[in-house]
Structures are given as structure tokens and as C-alpha cells.
Image (tube, helix red, strand yellow):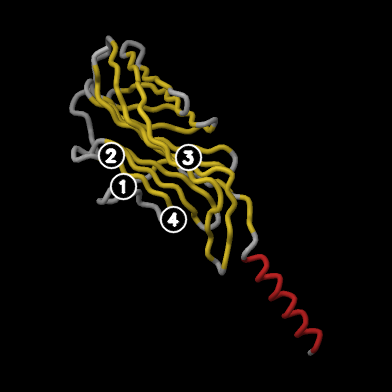
Amino acid sequence: MRIFGLLILVFGLWACSKSSSPDAAQFTTGGFASLKADGTIDVDLTDRTDGIYIDGNGQGFSYVLGLSGPNLVAFAAQGPWQPAVAPPTTGNIRFQTQYAVAAYANVTVIETGGVYNVQGIKKRQNGTLVLDADLLNGTVAGKDENLSVSATISGTDLKGAVSYLGMTGDLQGRISEDVVQGAFSGEMGADVFAGGFRGEAISE
């Protein structure tokens, strides 16, 4: 009985120490998700960071970063706007866009009493990005010192890639001759990011 009681005590001490110890963050497949009526992304996460940038016309994007259990994930979604007409197939359009992005970097996941929380760098950034659409070649591209966008046009849809502070991710978007929008998410190791952009055509 004394040995059995000692084993219970040792196991209990080990479990308590484990519950508060940091673990390296793990990335699980995030990507793109659907929106709720309030514009938030319809995923069940804890310790979440939301960004909602959707206007009254349904143009824009939302993103969320957070924990699914002990795993760090990032999701993005476009606004529900659907262009009525595809852009022309020749010529060029320059768009002035506003973007927003959030990232978790160099983080650990702490478990206390079965509850997981993120400790580390949580970064939010907003900026302005010029995107150039080459309609003949069906491409959209632009970059600043933090964010790079490269996409192809198919009708009114955009699909491509982004790079943010050395991390890479996937992009989905929509385009007309007047408006462009996109949403993106990605990861590198245990670091994750998500965001998007929305803008209007300008005279070159």
C-alpha cells in the first residue's frame, strides 16, 4: 500500500509539472474557411486573433489565428462580393490596395489545467500595396518591404502566392476592372500568418 501510494504521488507531481510546461508550437493545416454572418471566420479556436475588413458591399477579407487544441493555425476568407463582369483580357490596370496581416512568430504553447495559450510574438500590420494587373498575360503582382503578392487571373478569380517576412502562403481573390480583393494564409515551421487586401483601380 505504501509503494502504491508513493507511485500515485509521483505520477501526480509529474502531471502537474507537465501541465504548465511549454511545448513547441505545431502548425496544422489552416488555409481558407467560410465566414459567419458577423464577418468572423467560422472555426472553433482558442486564444484567437481576429481581423475583419469587409465593407458594406461585401468587399474585403477576414482572418483568424489561434489554437486548435495545442496546434497553431491560421485561416483567411474573402468577403462575399462577386464581380458582375470579368476584367478585360487586354491592357493593364493598377490597383491601390490596403492590406492587413497578423502573424505569430517564435511562440510556445503553454498548457495549464488542460487550457492552451500562446506565448510569443503576436504581430499585426497594416499597409498600402500597389498591385499591377497584366490582363493580356493574366497576372497580378506587387510588393513592398514586407508583403509580396503574385497571382494569376481566371475570369473573375485570382489564385496565387504571397510572401510575408520570409514566410510563404496561398492566396485566393477576385477581380473586376474596378476592384480587387484577396485573402491569404501561410506558415513557416511553427510560425503562421494570415491576412488580405482590398483596393480600387487608379490612373497610372
- Mark 1 to mark 2: distance in Å? 8 Å
Residue at figure coordinates x 32%, y 49% from the top left: 40
Residue at figure coordinates x 55%, y 67% from the top left: 114
- Mark 1 to mark 3: distance in Å? 18 Å
Tell me which label, 4 or 3, sits earlier in the chain: 4
Tell me which label, 1 or 3, sits earlier in the chain: 1
The residue most toward the right is 3
Residue at figure coordinates x 52%, y 64% from the top left: 115
Q: Which image quadrant: the N terminus?
A: bottom right
To which residue does mark 2 refer?
Answer: 79
Residue at figure coordinates x 65%, y 71% from the top left: 16
- Mark 4 to mark 3: distance in Å? 15 Å
> Quadrant of the rendered structure where residue 91 is?
top left
Tell me which label, 1 or 2, sits earlier in the chain: 1
Kind of residue at disc 2: Gly
Mark 3 Cα shell of 10 Å, populated few (<14), some (14-19), many (≥20): many
Q: Element at badge 4? A: loop
To which residue does mark 3 refer?
Answer: 193
Q: Which image quadrant: the C terminus?
A: top left
Q: Nearer the viewer, mark 3 or mark 2?
A: 3
Residue 130, image x, y percentages? 35, 21
To which residue does mark 4 refer?
Answer: 45
Kind of residue at disc 1: Leu
Kind of residue at disc 3: Phe
Label 1 close to label 2 by CB (< 8 Å): yes
Mark 2 Cα shell of 10 Å, populated few (<14), some (14-19), many (≥20): many
To which residue does mark 1 refer?
Answer: 35
Residue 45, image x, y percentages? 44, 55
Tell me which label, 1 or 4, sits earlier in the chain: 1
- Mark 1 to mark 4: distance in Å? 14 Å
Q: Element at badge 3? A: strand
